[in-house]
Image (cartoon, helix red, strand yellow):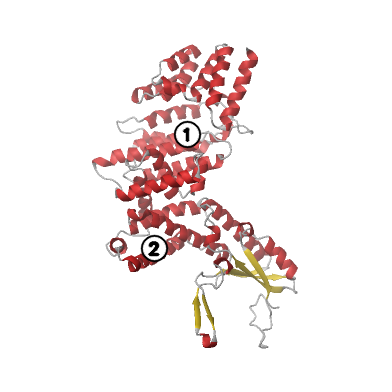
């Protein structure tokens, strides 16, 4: 008879990550076309774990405990379905193939990571739209609830649920393979996964007042999954390491991004002592390992920029010329209005505000820039530095009209007030 | 441990899957850690003796010779007992106070508190589990 003492301790987000791991294990056993069933079974197993461990204490090997419960539930569901409909013969066959003597080994650590990686390749399949990729990955790999995803994306639960349902249907009808791609296909598919993880990280990195912790969790998940990709021979490539470096070096600066009121701080106002040195070290290590092969990706260039910021003891001594060079590279590789806007900020440090204003004026897709609050915020700042206070105020006003998040609005209001007072 | 400790049984109801389905994984984990913390503190004080969850599957036997056998809890699912904790407390009031500190209450947990009668109705003294009777 057990006593209800907690024998084991659970690592942070254990339930969340176990949910994702279970999805991988169960999908291999039941087939990708049964994703909805798999999610139900995993949910049920997690609820049983919660109930049992609350009242009976945490077992010595919680992962094995949950896996066994989930497999038992799957077997029961299978038996029930086969009996009631007779239509689930394929499910039965799949089960026997995957659990039989010839099936892949079920419980070794490498196999489990492989299942998660397979699931990641499903989520990031090119026939799933990029927004849907990130939402699905958060749900089925990271174990987020629909409500958490909705909060992180400033959306509603109903909208997220609807999108998830559509994505699951697409996966089912297109019979997306639950496998790690091979051969010629691999590089493009890894690129697709990295693009989705980059998007996930950026979703988390966007400023937000109320849900800061949740958003930081998105960034941590992006880092966790990118690490997972790198651990597998199929994903261990310079581009993936460059992306991981970029994430780590960006994440390192998280603690200094906002002040006590939650307002955004500009780079030159941030307290660099708050930067996470251990993340910076890890990021630089990944960057060193990314410097291989003959392909420079935008992750390499962006990581390079992040590294130069992290390495500068203060704003003034930042290697701005080096940063401009990286932005020039980005501009050649993948010209976009956003890259030009960022390049302009670096150019301002090297060649002055007037050169930066010209860079923005010459950027492609002006209409896109026009609708982006940061364009006007940046132009406002450049006019301010030139002493053109009236134009600065005008730009900050336009930026404020377009900014959606509270910390951004707080910051812009402050800038606007300063400019108006100076006119 | 005080010598006048009286054994109580705390019966947990409304602790089934339906009660906690709407919680996110992180919320569940936090609740579970708090739940175990509540027990561990009591165990360290010598007040909690044992505790265990009960399987959900229920069978109810009644009628002459037990001929009437029903699956499942006879009332609503949330009425079913999901687990118990055996507690040593001074009196019913202290046992109540202890139950009131349970972190699961805010999510719907219902705790019934019953004193264990040491001498059973057949006149046989209940087998003493060492920590209960001194």
Report the residue at 46% width, 17% height from top.
Answer: A347
The 10 Å Cα crowd at callout 2, few under 14, some 14 to 19, many 20 or more, is many
Q: Which of marks 2 and 1 is nearer the N terminus?
A: 2
> Quadrant of residue A99 in the image?
bottom left
For disc 1, the marked residue is A249
Residue corresponding to mark 2: A74
Whether residue A397 is visible here, answered yes or no, is yes
**Residue A176 in view (yes/no):** no
Q: Which chain carries label 1?
A: A
Which chain letter matches label 2?
Answer: A
Q: In this view, does B98 lie to the left or right of A100?
A: right
Query: Percent position (x, y) of residue A214?
Result: 53, 42
Residue B133 located left or right of residue A169 = right
In front: B2, or A285?
B2
**Are discs 2 and 1 located on one and the same chain?**
yes
Q: Which quarter shows the N terminus of chain A? A: bottom right
Q: Which of B75 and A223 is in front in this view?
A: B75
In which quadrant is the C terminus of chain A drawn? top right
Residue B95: % across, % down? 71, 67
Find numbered disc 2 in the image and state the secondary structure of the residue it sits on. Answer: helix
Q: Residues within 10 Å of mark 1 (few under 14, many from 20)?
A: many
Closer-to-camera residue (A401/A347)? A401
User: Which element carries disc 1, helix, strand or loop?
Assistant: helix
Figure quadrant of residue B110? bottom right
The mark total stands at 2
Q: Is residue A154 left or right of residue A300?
A: right
Occupied quadrant, residue A80 = bottom left
Furthest residue in direction left, as rendered: A184
Where residue A321 appears, x then y in whole percent?
A: 44, 19
Question: In this rendering, is residue A190 above or below B111?
Answer: above
Q: Which mark is residue B33?
A: none
Indicate the position of residue A165 as horizontal and vertical percent values: 40, 48
């Amino acid at each position: 008879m057990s006593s209800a003492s907690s024998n084991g301790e659970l690592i942070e987000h254990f339930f969340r990550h176990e949910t994702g791991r279970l999805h991988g294990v169960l999908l291999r056993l039941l087939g990708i076309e049964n994703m909805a069933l798999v999610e139900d079974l995993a949910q049920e197993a997690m609820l049983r774990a919660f109930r049992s461990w609350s009242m009976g204490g945490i077992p010595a090997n919680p992962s094995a405990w949950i896996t066994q419960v989930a497999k038992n539930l799957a077997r029961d569901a299978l038996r029930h379905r086969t009996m009631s409909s007779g239509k689930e013969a394929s499910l039965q066959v799949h089960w026997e193939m995957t659990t039989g003597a010839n099936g892949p080994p079920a419980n070794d650590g490498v196999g489990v990571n492989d299942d998660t990686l397979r699931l990641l390749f499903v989520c990031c399949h090119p026939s799933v739209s990029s927004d849907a990729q990130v939402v699905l990955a958060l749900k089925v790999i990271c174990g987020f609830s629909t409500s958490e995803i909705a909060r992180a994306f400033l959306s509603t639960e109903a909208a997220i649920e609807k999108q998830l349902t559509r994505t699951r249907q697409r996966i089912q009808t297109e019979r997306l393979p639950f496998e790690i791609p091979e051969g010629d296909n691999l590089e493009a598919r890894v690129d697709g996964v990295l693009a989705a993880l980059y998007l996930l990280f950026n979703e988390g990195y966007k400023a937000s007042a109320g849900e800061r912790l949740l958003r930081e969790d998105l960034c941590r998940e992006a880092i966790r999954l990118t690490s997972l990709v790198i651990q597998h021979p199929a994903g261990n490539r310079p581009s993936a390491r460059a992306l991981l470096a970029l994430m780590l070096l960006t994440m390192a600066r998280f603690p200094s991004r906002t002040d006590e009121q939650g307002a955004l701080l500009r780079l030159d106002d941030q307290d660099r002592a708050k930067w996470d040195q251990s993340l910076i070290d890890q990021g630089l290590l990944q960057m060193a390992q990314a410097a291989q092969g003959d392909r420079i990706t935008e992750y390499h260039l962006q990581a390079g920029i992040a590294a130069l910021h992290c390495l500068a003891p203060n704003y003034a001594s930042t290697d701005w010329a080096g940063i401009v060079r990286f932005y020039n590279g980005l501009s050649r590789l993948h010209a976009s209005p956003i890259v030009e806007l960022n390049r302009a900020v670096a150019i301002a440090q090297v060649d002055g505000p007037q050169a930066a204003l010209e860079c923005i004026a010459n950027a492609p897709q002006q209409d896109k820039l026009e609708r982006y609050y940061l364009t006007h915020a940046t132009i406002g700042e450049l006019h301010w530095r030139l002493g053109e206070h009236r134009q600065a105020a005008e730009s900050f006003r336009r930026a404020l009209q377009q900014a959606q998040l509270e910390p951004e609005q707080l910051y812009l209001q402050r800038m606007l007030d300063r400019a108006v007072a100076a006119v | 441990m005080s010598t006048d400790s009286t054994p109580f049984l705390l019966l947990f109801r409304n602790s089934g899957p339906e009660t906690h389905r709407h919680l996110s994984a992180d919320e569940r984990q936090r609740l579970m850690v708090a739940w175990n913390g509540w027990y561990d503190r009591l165990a360290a004080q010598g007040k909690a003796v044992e505790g265990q969850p009960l399987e959900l599957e229920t069978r109810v036997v009644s009628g002459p010779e037990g001929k009437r056998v029903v699956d499942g809890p006879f009332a609503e699912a949330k009425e079913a007992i999901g687990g118990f904790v055996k507690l040593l407390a001074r009196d019913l009031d202290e046992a109540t106070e202890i139950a009131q500190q349970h972190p699961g209450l805010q999510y719907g947990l219902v705790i019934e508190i019953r004193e264990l009668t040491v001498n059973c109705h057949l006149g046989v003294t209940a087998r003493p589990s060492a920590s209960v009777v001194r």
